[in-house]
Image (cartoon, grey):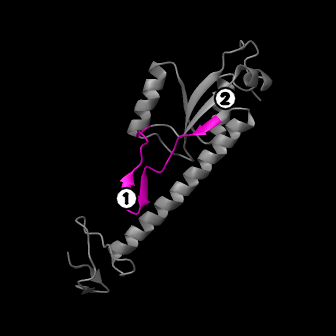
């Protein structure tokens, strides 16, 4: 599809300016309004992804600081390789972190003092920064956790700490 966007009041018409089916320019640096919007969107998406990764890392460090064994479950969902773009194997909706807290760790943190030996806590955590909300598949995962009495939480490190206090994994304070 040849570029037909208005560039400074005139139609560009350059055959090298190719647009996709939605009318967005696919040529880097062509100057089309659609191209600059695409660049802004992709840059904003990269910034949000980096911010989300920092939130996830901060949450994992918090869990580990309280003796939890935190396992990173997240991946970006799409990978780019020599053969092109392909989906990763992660099931949509799976939270970012899975954490184990042993009974000994819980008692050491001043949590449930009567926590019997051999009984610890396993939980899922979806890292979200700021006003981040759960998507549809994430809400379904949360619903299944509630239905099976499995701990599930979401938010940043402040929300994670409050969650640990509320569930008696660490002392309130």
Identity of the residue drawn at 21% across and 79% down:
2
Whether residue 141 sits left or right of residue 7 in the image: it is: right
Residue 76 within the magenta-colored segment of the rendering: yes
- State the image quarter where residue 172 is shown: top right
Query: What residue sits right under mark 1 in the picture?
Result: 85
Tell which of 61 and 161 is nearer to you: 61
Which range is magenta? 70-93
Residue 113 vertical placement versus 14 (above, below):
above
Residue 128 vertical placement versus 125 (above, below):
below
- State the image quarter where residue 123 is shown: top right
Q: Nearer the viewer, mark 1 or mark 2?
A: 1
On the image, the x and y values in percent for residue 100 come to 63, 28
Which residue of the protein is positioned furthest toward the front in this rendering? 82
Identity of the residue drawn at 69% across and 27% down:
165
On the image, the x and y values in percent for residue 133 come to 48, 42
For numbered disc 2, what is the local secondary structure?
helix
Whether residue 168 sits left or right of residue 156 in the image: it is: right
Query: What residue sits right under mark 2 in the picture?
Result: 164
Residue 144 vertical placement versus 131 (above, below):
above
Which quarter of the rendering shows the N terminus?
Answer: bottom left
Identity of the residue drawn at 25% across and 64% down:
22
Dot 2 surroundings within 10 Å: few (below 14), some, or many (20 or more)? some
Q: Which mark is residue 165?
A: none
């Amino acid at each position: 599809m040849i570029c037909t966007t208005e560039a400074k009041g005139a139609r560009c018409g350059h055959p090298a300016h190719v647009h996709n089916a939605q009318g967005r320019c696919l040529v880097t640096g062509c100057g089309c309004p659609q191209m600059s919007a695409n660049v802004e969107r992709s840059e904003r998406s990269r910034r949000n992804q980096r911010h989300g990764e920092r939130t996830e890392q901060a949450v994992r460090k918090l869990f580990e600081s309280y003796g939890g064994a935190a396992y990173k479950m997240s991946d970006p969902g799409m990978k780019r390789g020599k053969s092109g773009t392909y989906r990763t194997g992660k099931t949509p909706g799976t939270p970012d972190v899975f954490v184990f807290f042993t009974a000994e760790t819980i008692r050491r943190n001043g949590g449930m003092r009567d926590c019997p030996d051999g009984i610890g806590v396993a939980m899922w955590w979806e890292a979200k920064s700021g006003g981040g909300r759960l998507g549809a598949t994430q809400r379904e995962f949360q619903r299944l956790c509630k239905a099976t009495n499995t701990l599930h939480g979401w938010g940043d490190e402040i929300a994670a700490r409050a969650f640990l206090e509320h569930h008696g994994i660490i002392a309130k304070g």
